[in-house]
Image (cartoon, helix red, strand yellow):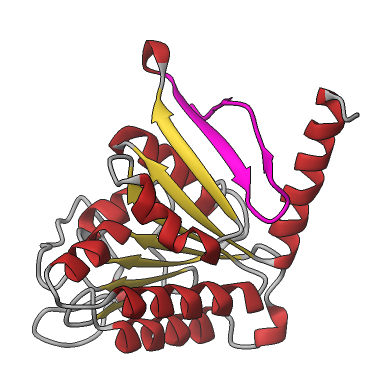
Amino acid sequence: MSTDATRVEAFAEHLAALKREGAAVLVRADPRAEDAACHRLLGEPGLDRRHVLVSTASTERTLSRYEPRETESHRLGVVDASGGRYTRSAAAATPTASDMQTGAEATPSWQTTVDGPTEFSAILDAVDDHVERLFPATDAIGPGELRVCLDNLDALLDAVDGDEATEEDVFTFLHVLTNRVREHGGLVHVHVSAGIADSLVARYEPLFDATVDAETGPGGRVRQKWRLLDVGLESAWLTLD
């Protein structure tokens, strides 16, 4: 019979293996907890990580989570798939002159814009382009060095409800995205709101290695609980802030 100590040890070992080998994580959270979970999964600002952020709803909000990291072109790629539902503010990110491209709107060199959240091929191509730019030699990507954030799945579920996409389209897109990041030994995390029905989450959960439930708990403290899906292990509630 396994003890609590052996279960904790097994959980830690499997989680460490996922971080080494590449993993996809589904994060279900309330707004405050979502920010804390995203910040943690992106890696501490002092670590040597390179990031690709994909925004399907509010690129400004996605970029705000990136702070206090610098928006430097050799560390960051952003795919704005919000479909025009976003106006970048100076507070969200202020690129240096070397990060700007010439043009009427002076788009940062680390940002790519696609027409909307259901332009799945264009999003995948843009992610690939940023990964190639951030890692010119693909064999130079260390375990966990690439971090990809998709914010958020809600917009894709709304597109299904609005007949702009099918469930199969969304499933295929997530399947390709998560596998490509795993192939690089990276970590991709996908955000979905806490209010999304369990039945909807269950449809896409098989694409992921782990799920994280994050919430603002008693006393306003943010906490998280992990489930490692392939091995059926679950953590206790862990403090995030």
Please say whether residue 240 is one of the residues in the magenta stretch.
yes
Q: Nearer the viewer, residue 228 or 23?
A: 228
Q: Nearer the viewer, residue 55 or 136?
A: 55
**Eyeballing the image, is 222 above or below 93?**
above
Q: Nearer the viewer, residue 232 or 222?
A: 232
Q: Position of residue 43 (x, y in %)?
A: 56, 50
In the image: residue 66, left or right of residue 86: right
Q: Is residue 116 visible?
A: yes
Residue at figure coordinates x 62%, y 59% from the top left: 48
Task: Give the residues drawn in magenta, as a range.
Answer: 221-241
Q: Is residue 98 visible?
A: no
Please say whether residue 62 is one of the residues in the magenta stretch.
no
Q: Position of residue 202 (x, y in %)?
A: 44, 55
Picture quadrant of residue 115:
bottom left
**Eyeballing the image, is 80 above or below 153?**
below
In the image: residue 32, left or right of residue 204: left
Q: Position of residue 235 (x, y in %)?
A: 65, 33
Quadrant (top left, top right, bottom left, bottom right) of the N terminus: top right
Residue at figure coordinates x 49%, y 58% from the top left: 205
In the image: residue 81, left or right of residue 78: left
Residue at figure coordinates x 22%, y 78% from the top left: 165
Residue found farthest to the top:
219
Figure label count: 0
**Eyeballing the image, is 188 above or below 68?**
below
Residue found farthest to the right:
1
